[in-house]
């Protein structure tokens, strides 16, 4: 079985081909991404109309390149999968409509994939034993979720952010410090040069028994700290080291909460496998500290390779592959949904 996946929910136009390998995990034959980040950076965030227009322009070339790299023809594809939400509606429509048109023309099945399910399953793309029941922490720009995963489509939401998602917190603090969009990688880069212990930012809800998160207080804490460092309160007047120390303090506050809640969830559920995914799981310090926390508790940690953490189509094709294996195809009139739910649970954060 050969699955073609298309992702266009935000600012990446991506196409990937994933092929079944007898007796082992499916292989990602190609994963091509055309990013619009430099374009949206000019505006400090994603402009929906620009995103959808550029998906339309970029998709044909990305599709052609993905097929070329995979050394397959469009006629070899058995299943067409695409992101149906959550995301920007006009952006979603581009990839989704293309996948449906290809499926209709080729008389092959179509599968609508939840973007968060793509992230959720992505750590297992390369895992030799495939998907196993586990505890998932999904940390992206729009969501922070703790999920008990029992199998494909069997998801139980344990906790989520009550306000800003972890990635959103990185992005908003970066914006406040006038650092380029997206903020996560920028704060990460500066944090590596800073001292995390200099500023102790709040770690909301860390000691509470429930598994929800709250990250919106971080930007307020940074806002109040700025004038204590420079009279003007202008981040451009901050000495380089102060800026790096602020970034390190913010990164550590987010990491501490993520790890603490994840370990609490592992204890509660008894899971011995934890998977972390989404754009924030690209963060090296989070990866290292989560690995250490898991090692101490004899828990297996499954992480996607860095190139499958931020938005990509391999995770969509892989989720499509797993859904196709259980015959879970979608009718061609399945709509896109900017607030698509995962497994019957509303997952807005
Ligand atoms: O999963 P993703 O690519 O898109 C969504 O589905 O939202 O995640 C994007 C988020 C952004 O908030 C970005 O700032 C964050 O992931 N991010 C990072 C890093 N790389 C990307 N956050 C922290 N450290 C990073 N290295
Ligand atoms: Zn994403």
Image (cartoon, rainbow, N blue to C red):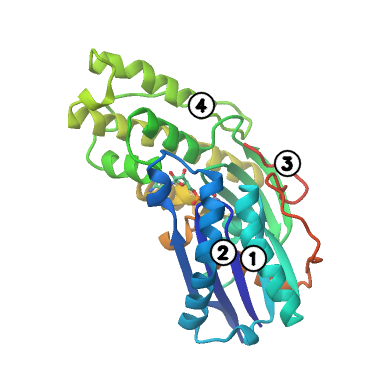
Mark 2–mark 1 Cα distance, whole angstroms, equals 6 Å
Location of the C terminus (image quadrant): top right
Residue at image coords 47%, 56%: 309
Under circle 3, the secondary element is loop
Categorize mark 1 by other alpha carbons within 10 Å: few (<14), some (14-19), many (20+). many
Residue at image coords 60%, 55%: 120
* In contact (CB < 8 Å): disc 4 and disc 2: no
Location of the N terminus (image quadrant): bottom right
What number is the disc on residue 216? 4
Q: Quadrant of residue 75?
A: bottom right
Which residue lies under the disc numbered 3?
Answer: 346
Residue at image coords 43%, 62%: 307
Q: Quadrant of residue 153?
A: bottom right
* In contact (CB < 8 Å): disc 2 and disc 1: yes
Q: Give the mark nearer the N terminus: 4 vs 3.
A: 4
Q: Nearer the viewer, residue 316 or 325?
A: 316
Task: Tell me if residue 135 comes above or below residue 23 in the rendering.
Answer: above
Question: 181 left or right of 146?
Answer: left
Task: Tell me if residue 8 comes above or below residue 43 in the rendering.
Answer: below
Which residue lies under the disc numbered 1?
Answer: 319
Under circle 1, the secondary element is helix
Residue at image coords 72%, 67%: 111
Q: Quadrant of residue 245?
A: top left
What number is the disc on residue 315? 2
Ligand 1 within 8 Å, label 4 CB = no
* Residue 85 coordinates in the image, percent (x, y): 66, 52
């Amino acid at each position: 079985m050969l699955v073609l996946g298309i992702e266009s929910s935000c600012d990446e136009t991506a196409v990937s081909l994933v092929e079944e390998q007898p007796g082992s995990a499916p292989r990602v034959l190609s994963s091509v991404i055309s990013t619009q980040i430099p374009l949206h950076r000019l505006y400090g965030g994603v402009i929906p109309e620009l995103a959808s227009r550029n998906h339309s322009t970029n998709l044909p070339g990305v599709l052609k390149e993905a097929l070329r790299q995979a050394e397959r023809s469009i006629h070899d594809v058995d299943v067409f999968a695409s992101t149906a939400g959550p995301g920007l509606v006009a952006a979603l429509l581009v990839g989704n409509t293309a996948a449906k048109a290809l499926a209709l023309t080729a008389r092959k099945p179509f599968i609508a994939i939840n973007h968060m399910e793509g992230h959720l399953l992505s750590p297992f793309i390369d895992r030799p034993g495939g998907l196993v029941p586990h505890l998932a922490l999904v940390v992206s720009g729009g969501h922070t979720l703790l999920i008990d995963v029992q199998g494909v489509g069997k998801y139980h939401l344990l906790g989520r952010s009550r306000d800003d998602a972890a990635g959103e917190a990185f992005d908003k603090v970066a914006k406040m410090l006038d650092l380029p969009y997206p903020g996560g990688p920028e704060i990460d880069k500066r944090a590596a040069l800073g001292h995390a212990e200099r500023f102790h930012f709040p770690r909301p809800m860390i000691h509470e028994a429930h598994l929800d998160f709250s990250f919106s207080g971080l930007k307020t804490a940074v806002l109040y700290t700025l004038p204590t460092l420079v009279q003007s309160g202008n981040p451009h007047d901050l000495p380089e080291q102060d800026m790096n120390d602020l970034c390190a303090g913010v990164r550590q506050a987010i990491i501490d909460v993520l790890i603490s809640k994840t370990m609490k969830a592992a204890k509660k559920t008894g899971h011995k496998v934890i998977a972390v995914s989404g754009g924030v799981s690209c963060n090296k310090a989070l990866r290292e500290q989560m690995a250490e926390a898991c090692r101490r508790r004899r828990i297996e940690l499954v992480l996607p390779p860095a190139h499958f953490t931020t938005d990509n189509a391999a995770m969509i094709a892989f989720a499509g592959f797993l859904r196709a294996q259980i015959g879970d195809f979608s009718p061609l009139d399945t709509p896109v949904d900017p607030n698509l739910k995962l497994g019957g649970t509303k997952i807005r954060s």
